[in-house]
Amino acid sequence: MNEKAEQLANRFREVILNGTWIANTNYKDQLENLDWDIAISKFESLNTISILAQHIHYYVNGIKNVFNGGNLEIRDKYSFNFPTIKSENEWKAFLSKFWNDAENLAELIEQLPNEKLSQNFVDDKYGTYQRNIDGMIEHSYYHLGQILLIKKIILKNK
Protein backbone atom coordinates (compact mmCIF):
# COMPACT_ATOMS: atom_id res chain seq x y z
CA MET A 1 0.00 0.00 0.00
CA ASN A 2 1.19 3.51 -0.79
CA GLU A 3 2.12 5.20 2.50
CA LYS A 4 1.32 8.71 1.24
CA ALA A 5 -2.11 7.64 -0.03
CA GLU A 6 -2.78 5.83 3.24
CA GLN A 7 -1.92 8.98 5.21
CA LEU A 8 -4.29 11.05 3.03
CA ALA A 9 -7.07 8.50 3.49
CA ASN A 10 -6.59 8.57 7.24
CA ARG A 11 -6.61 12.39 7.32
CA PHE A 12 -9.89 12.29 5.38
CA ARG A 13 -11.32 9.72 7.82
CA GLU A 14 -10.27 11.95 10.73
CA VAL A 15 -12.42 14.89 9.65
CA ILE A 16 -15.47 12.87 8.65
CA LEU A 17 -15.53 9.67 10.66
CA ASN A 18 -13.26 9.31 13.64
CA GLY A 19 -10.58 11.90 14.28
CA THR A 20 -9.94 14.40 17.01
CA TRP A 21 -6.46 15.66 16.17
CA ILE A 22 -7.23 18.94 14.32
CA ALA A 23 -10.66 20.04 15.58
CA ASN A 24 -10.99 17.74 18.58
CA THR A 25 -14.09 16.36 16.85
CA ASN A 26 -15.40 15.17 13.48
CA TYR A 27 -18.64 15.09 11.46
CA LYS A 28 -19.78 11.72 12.81
CA ASP A 29 -19.18 12.80 16.40
CA GLN A 30 -21.16 16.01 15.88
CA LEU A 31 -24.02 14.66 13.76
CA GLU A 32 -24.61 11.02 14.72
CA ASN A 33 -26.87 11.78 17.70
CA LEU A 34 -28.10 15.20 16.61
CA ASP A 35 -31.89 15.44 16.42
CA TRP A 36 -33.06 16.14 12.91
CA ASP A 37 -35.09 19.15 14.04
CA ILE A 38 -31.86 20.80 15.20
CA ALA A 39 -30.11 19.75 11.98
CA ILE A 40 -32.74 21.54 9.89
CA SER A 41 -33.17 24.55 12.19
CA LYS A 42 -32.50 27.86 10.50
CA PHE A 43 -30.68 30.71 12.20
CA GLU A 44 -30.92 34.02 10.38
CA SER A 45 -29.26 33.74 6.96
CA LEU A 46 -26.91 30.89 7.88
CA ASN A 47 -27.11 27.51 6.20
CA THR A 48 -28.62 24.74 8.28
CA ILE A 49 -26.46 21.98 9.70
CA SER A 50 -28.15 19.48 7.39
CA ILE A 51 -27.43 21.60 4.31
CA LEU A 52 -23.76 21.91 5.27
CA ALA A 53 -23.48 18.16 5.88
CA GLN A 54 -25.19 17.42 2.57
CA HIS A 55 -22.88 19.94 0.87
CA ILE A 56 -19.80 18.03 2.04
CA HIS A 57 -21.41 14.72 1.10
CA TYR A 58 -22.10 16.12 -2.39
CA TYR A 59 -18.37 16.65 -2.90
CA VAL A 60 -17.45 13.30 -1.34
CA ASN A 61 -19.77 11.59 -3.83
CA GLY A 62 -18.51 13.65 -6.76
CA ILE A 63 -14.89 12.84 -6.08
CA LYS A 64 -15.74 9.20 -5.35
CA ASN A 65 -17.43 8.98 -8.75
CA VAL A 66 -14.22 10.10 -10.49
CA PHE A 67 -12.13 7.65 -8.45
CA ASN A 68 -14.50 4.90 -9.61
CA GLY A 69 -13.83 5.82 -13.26
CA GLY A 70 -16.79 8.13 -13.79
CA ASN A 71 -16.97 11.74 -14.88
CA LEU A 72 -16.74 14.80 -12.68
CA GLU A 73 -20.46 15.60 -12.59
CA ILE A 74 -20.63 17.89 -9.56
CA ARG A 75 -20.95 21.65 -9.97
CA ASP A 76 -20.46 24.33 -7.34
CA LYS A 77 -23.72 26.02 -8.34
CA TYR A 78 -25.67 22.91 -7.25
CA SER A 79 -23.67 22.15 -4.11
CA PHE A 80 -26.17 23.71 -1.68
CA ASN A 81 -29.41 22.67 -3.43
CA PHE A 82 -30.98 19.88 -1.40
CA PRO A 83 -34.54 19.13 -0.38
CA THR A 84 -35.31 19.72 3.27
CA ILE A 85 -34.97 16.63 5.42
CA LYS A 86 -38.47 15.98 6.73
CA SER A 87 -38.02 13.32 9.42
CA GLU A 88 -35.63 11.68 11.84
CA ASN A 89 -35.61 8.62 9.55
CA GLU A 90 -34.55 10.71 6.55
CA TRP A 91 -31.80 12.32 8.65
CA LYS A 92 -30.53 8.93 9.88
CA ALA A 93 -30.63 7.51 6.33
CA PHE A 94 -28.64 10.48 5.02
CA LEU A 95 -26.05 10.11 7.79
CA SER A 96 -25.67 6.39 7.12
CA LYS A 97 -25.08 7.12 3.43
CA PHE A 98 -22.63 9.92 4.32
CA TRP A 99 -20.55 7.63 6.57
CA ASN A 100 -20.57 4.77 4.06
CA ASP A 101 -19.64 7.00 1.12
CA ALA A 102 -16.88 8.68 3.14
CA GLU A 103 -15.37 5.32 4.11
CA ASN A 104 -15.64 4.14 0.52
CA LEU A 105 -13.80 7.25 -0.70
CA ALA A 106 -11.11 6.74 1.97
CA GLU A 107 -10.62 3.17 0.72
CA LEU A 108 -10.31 4.43 -2.86
CA ILE A 109 -7.75 7.04 -1.77
CA GLU A 110 -5.72 4.31 -0.03
CA GLN A 111 -5.52 2.36 -3.28
CA LEU A 112 -4.02 5.22 -5.29
CA PRO A 113 -0.50 4.57 -6.51
CA ASN A 114 2.03 7.28 -5.67
CA GLU A 115 2.34 8.44 -9.28
CA LYS A 116 -1.44 8.99 -9.50
CA LEU A 117 -1.29 11.53 -6.65
CA SER A 118 0.77 13.87 -8.85
CA GLN A 119 -1.40 13.42 -11.95
CA ASN A 120 -4.07 15.89 -12.98
CA PHE A 121 -7.51 15.33 -11.50
CA VAL A 122 -9.87 15.19 -14.52
CA ASP A 123 -8.45 18.40 -16.05
CA ASP A 124 -5.29 20.38 -15.41
CA LYS A 125 -7.39 23.34 -14.20
CA TYR A 126 -8.34 21.28 -11.12
CA GLY A 127 -4.76 20.45 -10.17
CA THR A 128 -3.55 17.06 -9.02
CA TYR A 129 -5.26 14.22 -7.22
CA GLN A 130 -3.21 15.14 -4.13
CA ARG A 131 -4.40 18.75 -4.28
CA ASN A 132 -8.04 17.68 -4.62
CA ILE A 133 -7.82 15.26 -1.71
CA ASP A 134 -6.14 17.90 0.45
CA GLY A 135 -8.77 20.41 -0.69
CA MET A 136 -11.59 18.02 0.27
CA ILE A 137 -10.09 17.64 3.74
CA GLU A 138 -9.62 21.40 4.20
CA HIS A 139 -13.09 22.13 2.82
CA SER A 140 -14.55 19.61 5.27
CA TYR A 141 -12.83 21.23 8.25
CA TYR A 142 -14.03 24.67 7.13
CA HIS A 143 -17.67 23.56 7.16
CA LEU A 144 -17.21 21.48 10.33
CA GLY A 145 -16.31 24.73 12.09
CA GLN A 146 -19.50 26.32 10.76
CA ILE A 147 -21.55 23.34 11.93
CA LEU A 148 -20.08 23.62 15.43
CA LEU A 149 -20.92 27.33 15.66
CA ILE A 150 -24.43 26.94 14.25
CA LYS A 151 -25.10 24.02 16.59
CA LYS A 152 -24.04 26.14 19.60
CA ILE A 153 -26.22 29.07 18.50
CA ILE A 154 -29.28 26.89 17.93
CA LEU A 155 -28.91 24.95 21.20
CA LYS A 156 -28.44 28.21 23.09
CA ASN A 157 -31.63 29.65 21.56
CA LYS A 158 -33.82 26.56 22.10
Image (spheres, rainbow, N blue to C red):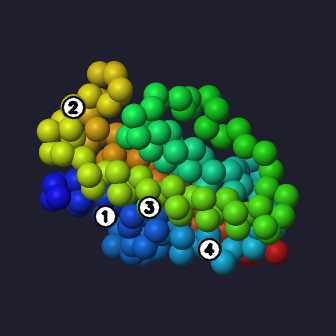
Task: Give the position of the C terminus as an image quadrant.
Answer: bottom right
Q: Considering the numbered disc 1 on the image, is that residue within a helix, a strand or a loop?
A: helix
- Residue 103 bears which disc, if any? 3
Front-lying residue, 156 or 110: 110
Q: How far across and how far down the image is residue 55, in percent?
A: 60, 47
- The residue where tag 4 is placed is 32
Q: Give the number of the disc on residue 84.
A: none
Mark number for residue 119? 2
Query: Measuring 63% from the left and 63% from the top, which residue is drawn there?
Result: 95
Label 1 belongs to which residue? 10
Q: Distance of mark 1 from mark 2, alpha carbons?
A: 20 Å
Number of other residues with Cα within 10 Å of mark 2, as a class: few under 14, some 14 to 19, many 20 or more: some
What is the CA distance from the residue labelled 2 to the residue labelled 3? 23 Å
Identified by mark 3, the residue type is Glu
Q: Nearer the N terminus, badge 1 or badge 4? A: 1
| Pointer 2 or 3: first along the chain | 3
Query: Which residue occupies 46% across, 28% down?
Result: 71
Spatial CA distance of label 3 from label 4 is 15 Å
